[in-house]
Image (tube, grey):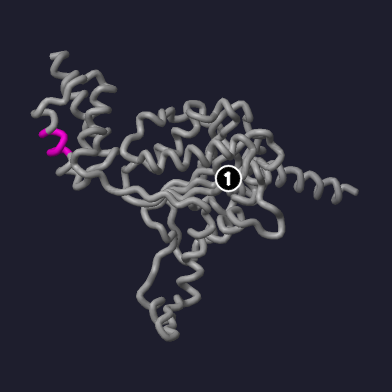
Amino acid sequence: MANIENLISRAESLINKLEAFLPAPVSAPDWSAIAWRWVATHGLSTQGRGYLQAVPHPHHIKLDDIRNVDEQKAEIVRNTEQFVNGLPANNVLLTGARGTGKSSLVKALLSQFSKQGLRLIEVDKQDLVALPDIVALLRNRPEYFVIFCDDLSFEASDPGYKALKVVLDGSISATSDNVMVYATSNRRHLMPEFMSENLETQYVGEEIRPGDTTEEKVSLSERFGIWLSFYAFNQDEYLKVAQQWLKHYGIKKMTDDIQQAALSFSHTRGARSGRVAYQFARDYAGRVGLSAKR
């Protein structure tokens, strides 16, 4: 009897020590928020899954602040409006030049449609394996959720690739009507392509049939019902966006000197884009403000 009590005491001591290393239980999501991040956890008690962490101060961007992408803006706004009205809508893939407003456009949708029940969940590429768990959390909620995957691309061995395919297309279980995936990428085909894959191509008369590997890689992009392409700005478009942001920071007129400074700034960055225009406006407005304080 004494041996049994001693064994139980040692077991309880061991359990207490192990509990100190285990993560705290994950609480239920704060459904009063309008935006969340998926935070992966890898402790023993959570089985490598994660939880929705509310974003207390989402980045509020107005659709009117995003310029030179009017066609793309109209398409994604129409699709999102269908979605929040309970109508059929499509997952969206935004691809193209960096800094042209892809991510900002998705974030601006939250400002536009949050009062109609739109919610945004940001999921990092390495956490896409948790998509089935995330969708399960959302399935019975009354809100409309956009799962946002920014700067998406995969290596051939990435496990998130198959998880994303399942959520986009469904598996044995149906996709959820209150969940959409909006993803941005710098390339249309989300997986790398190699020269060796060209050897799989077959030529039947004048018909070209891509190999199975190429077809598999293209198939992921094809699971997005809407593709929106973004292109690098020309000089006039870049200057218009820079002028817009300068007005935002209180500089109402773009003089020839300011215009030249904006062009010089873009040359140092090696690109003309909305992001570079925004960075120039912040830099220039900050310089002007600092001079005024001296």
Which corner quadrant of the image does residue 141 belong to? top right
Is the residue 34 above or below the residue 39 in the image? above
The answer to if 174 sits in the magenta stretch is: no
Q: Residue at x 71, y 59 (%)?
A: 172
Looking at the rendered structure, the kind of residue marked 1 is Ala
Q: Position of residue 31 (x, y in %)?
A: 63, 30
Question: Which secondary structure class fits the magenta region best?
Answer: helix
**Residue farthest along the front direction in this orientation:** 206
Which quadrant: the C terminus?
top left
| 205 relative position to 51: left or right | left
Which corner quadrant of the image does residue 103 belong to? top left
The stretch of residues the image draws in magenta is 260-265
The residue at which mark 1 appears reads as 89
Q: Position of residue 231 (x, y in %)?
A: 30, 49
Q: Position of residue 256 (x, y in %)?
A: 9, 29
Q: Residue at x 53, y 30 (%)?
A: 113
Q: For the residue carrying disc 1, how many other residues have a C-alpha within 10 Å: few (<14), some (14-19), or many (20+)?
A: some
Viewer-closest of 19 and 88: 88
Is the residue 234 above or below the residue 64 in the image? below
